[in-house]
Amino acid sequence: MSAYLQAARRVIRTEAEGLALLADGLGDSFDRAVETVLAARGRVVVSGMGKSGHVGRKIAATLASTGTPAQFVHPAEASHGDLGMVTQGDVALVLSNSGETPELADLIAHTRRFQIPLIGVAARAQSTLLRQADVALVLPAAPEACGTGIVPTTSTTMTMALGDALAVALMEHRKFTPEHFRTFHPGGKLGAKLSKVADLMHQDMPLVSEDAPMAEALLTISQKSFGVTGVTDVQGRLTGIITDGDLRRHMQGLLDHRAAEVMTRNPRTIGPDQLAEAALAEMQDRRITSLFVVTPQGAPAGLIHIHDFLRTGLV
């Protein structure tokens, strides 16, 4: 094994041990932190200096994207006017491994002056930050993975994980769903996966009635370019679908038939409010290229095609 690989494994194992200590050490203070955030009328204002600041930006972003309004405020900028961003009704989440970071002093004093709840995260229970905090979250005594104890490694990993734990606990309490998540992630592949079927479906569908002659059905299939047509009854409900396979099975005397005689009955469908990812899974499982979207009453509302997923980058 190379020295590089040995170092990598040592780092990961050291940080994993720190995370295990963190998980085992969580107690009532974590519950109080969650309840403090839930009680806030405003935002969670996250702050930290140096590496803690980088971690804080990520925690603020994770909170904001999972239903807890949050923003990061740089402590040095806070001392030069940005303290105005921290108002009554907010809750401050302040990160510092030592708990003695001098740049945090003005922010801590501001929260005390205006009775803004302060959640502190640090490794020293008797540090200035945790003594001033309304809720103190103490990081366990775990060695840094660098081996010298100088480079923030295990400590930043534990802080990041603690932020994730806080965000997920809040998310689960609020019953935050994938649909809510999509509201904050409309772009990219993630946004596409969390799109609803209604967001991707085509409303200009190929449809014929059950008593339509097959000549009309063939013309509809050709005009709409989906390779299929839906078939509806007199109440307007989707009762069948005609595909290339159906056409081949009825090739003999095809034009002498009506749509109801050729169609495949009870086709696979999906609702407009279901996730697009569910539609894709159904199409892949059934090895089909199109899926009709129907209302709860069974009326066709749209059509979703495999090309729609290719276009959005889902496949």
Image (cartoon, rainbow, N blue to C red):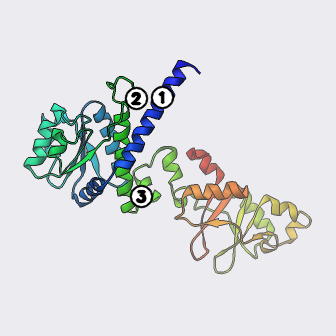
- Name above or below for residue 44 compared with residue 50: below
At horizontal 24% and vertical 52% (from top left) the residue drawn is 43
Q: CA distance from mark 3 to mark 1?
A: 39 Å
Which residue has dot 1 on it? 10
At horizontal 71% and vertical 68% (from top left) the residue drawn is 267
- Picture coordinates of residue 107 (x, y %)? 14, 40
Q: Residues within 10 Å of mark 3 (few under 14, many from 20)?
A: some
Between 84 and 126, the residue placed more toward the observer is 126
Q: Are marks 3 and 2 in contact (CB under 8 Å)?
A: no
Q: Earlier in the sequence, mark 2 or mark 1?
A: 1
- Picture coordinates of residue 214 (x, y %)? 80, 68
Which residue has dot 2 on it? 145
Which quadrant holds the N terminus? top right
Q: Residues within 10 Å of mark 1 (few under 14, many from 20)?
A: some
- Picture coordinates of residue 39 (x, y %)? 23, 60
Task: Kindly indicate the quadrant of the structure image that contains residue 244.
Answer: bottom right
Task: Kindly indicate the quadrant of the structure image that contains residue 32.
Answer: bottom left
Between 75 and 280, the residue placed more toward the observer is 75
Tell which residue pokes out farthest to the top in this image.
3
- In screen coordinates, is 184 left or right of 240? left
Q: Are marks 3 and 1 in contact (CB under 8 Å)?
A: no
Tell which residue pokes out farthest to the left in this image.
113
Q: Which SS class for mark 3? A: helix
Which residue has dot 3 on it? 180
- In screen coordinates, is 22 left or right of 12? left
